[in-house]
Amino acid sequence: MSGETKTRREADAPRAGRRMFIQSYGCQMNVYDARRMSDLLALQGYGEAASAEDADLVVLNTCHIRERASEKIFSELGRLRELKAARSASGDALKIVVAGCLAQAEGAEIQRRQSAVDVVVGPQSYHRLPELLARAGNGARVVEAEFPEEDKFGFLPAPTEAATRRRGVSAFLTVQEGCDKFCSFCVVPYTRGAEFSRPVAAVVEEARALLAQGVRELTLIGQNVNAYHGAGEDGAQASLAGLMERLARLPGLARLRYTTSHPNDMAADLIEAHRALPALAPYLHLPVQSGSDAILKAMNRRHTSADYLALIGEIRAARPDIALSSDFIVGFPGESEADFEATMALVEAVGFSASFSFKYSPRPGTPGAERSDQIPEEVKSRRLLALQELLERQRQAFNRACVGRTLDVLVEKRGRHEGQVGGKTPYLQAVHFEGGPELVGRMLPVEILSAGSNSLHGRLKAREAA
Ligand code: SAH
Ligand code: SF4
Ligand code: F3S
């Protein structure tokens, strides 16, 4: 689920006045946070810059999940330091903010190593950015990496119309944050703090604002989104299934998704929602990490490979056409050849439509990093390659199996070629077909004609389906 995203909004950038450039690394939570930061800073008068070079304020919204993620950010900070030096030589100030999970985990270190950084702000405190920037403006350098008592969502501005227009047809909506699971490889419980669920009413309000401004698909996000247990509108606690049932009644909503889920939190009502809720896309990202029981235990995942397979059986019984994706880690300390083969066997048994797979990266402060039985790099590389080959074969097979089917496609944007539009199938595949820009925002039946390596090509079947 990790990827790199740039928040670039050249079109709306004013020619004069202060300009911001926000670059986001890591997961969807960061993409969402970057958008909220951008809305917040827009209210402070910041327009959008096309690059750091054009900006007065650069925000790096960072990730700490693997060592490479952190390294990339330190190298980008090196580049920004030079840019800032060149700019101040010409009397033109540049402010640098480091936000996100690396800021939370290594705030003091960043300040020590990178004197060019003005503000360090953790993922639970970015609602205080305007105040922190004002303090930094007086020559101070500010680190804010506490987990404050207040709920940042209560302090963030509602999405503005201009911001939503740029957001497009599909939007993320954070409903849950943090994690109490402490998988032994993972930094998230340390960087994002304890599990927290937003109240149903707050989620509904934000969803309404997004839908009113043209969003048609909502992806509810959280590090453990299916552990959601927010206060309901009736005062009782709501589950994720309850929340989605409520959201599905909102006018204008075409499709719902949620990510990321932990297998142990796949409650019966959530599985049932996949049968009963037409708006809920038949797609589930359910990371398993490993197929070996010994490794799952060492990872503190608290389920076995058989538990996972049984769960998949239940989910498929509720929604036979569901597409499944997962995250995998190879080379966790102590992983034997047999453990790795168990992962390959699980992948064969399930058949995934897409997946993310990583070499284990020891993270400071996590139990996995302390272990003395780390796996050599070349073994990790070999296993990752074998796993990725298998996962890619499954992905291509899944895509090919869609050829000839007619799928509901939510049209998101103009296609790369003139006269084409692009959108997503229920299974999160990118698809393009002939059509004009007036189709953007509509859910349409599209017959899939062919499967390329990264997207499908189709033909519009009839008029609007939803
Ligand atoms: N909350 C989600 C995932 C969070 S992080 C879950 O429970 O599955 C996203 C993915 O990054 C994880 O699923 C895992 O596959 C990977 N990851 C996390 N820590 C890692 C580490 N130390 N080394 C390699 N991959 C890691
Ligand atoms: Fe990390 Fe595990 Fe929590 Fe997912 S469930 S965020 S992998 S600690
Ligand atoms: Fe990275 Fe933080 Fe997300 S560590 S994956 S940005 S929760």
Image: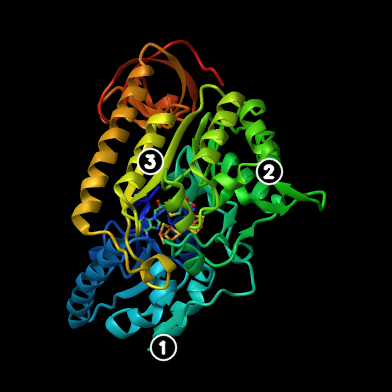
Relative to the observer, which residue lies in front, 354 or 236? Answer: 354
On the image, the x and y values in percent for residue 136 come to 41, 83
Location of mark 1 (residue)? 138
Secondary element under disc 3, as helix, strand or loop, is helix
Residue identifier under label 3:
342
Residue 362 in the image: x percent, y percent? 34, 65
Q: Which amino acid does the dot numbered 1 rest on?
A: Asn
Of marks 3 and 2, the one in the foreground? 3
Residue 402 position by quadrant: top left
Give the spatial CA distance, label 1 vs label 3: 58 Å
Residue at horizontal 50 percent and vertical 24 percent from the top: 443
Q: Assess disc 2: are there few (<14), some (14-19) or many (≥20) residues with their C-alpha within 10 Å of its C-alpha.
A: many
Q: CA distance from mark 3 to mark 2?
A: 36 Å
Mark 1 residue crowding within 10 angstroms, few (<14) / some (14–19) / many (20+): few
Of marks 1 and 3, which one's residue comes earlier in the chain? 1
Q: Which mark sits nearer the N-terminus, 3 or 2?
A: 2
Q: Are marks 3 and 2 in contact (CB under 8 Å)?
A: no
In this view of the protein, can residue 238 be seen by the observer?
Answer: yes
| Depth order, front residue of 125/42 | 125
What residue sits 44% from the left and 78% below the top? 133
Name the residue type under label 3.
Answer: Ala
Viewer-side label of 1, 3: 3
Q: Which amino acid, by three-letter code, is at mark 2?
A: Leu
Q: Secondary structure at mark 2?
A: helix
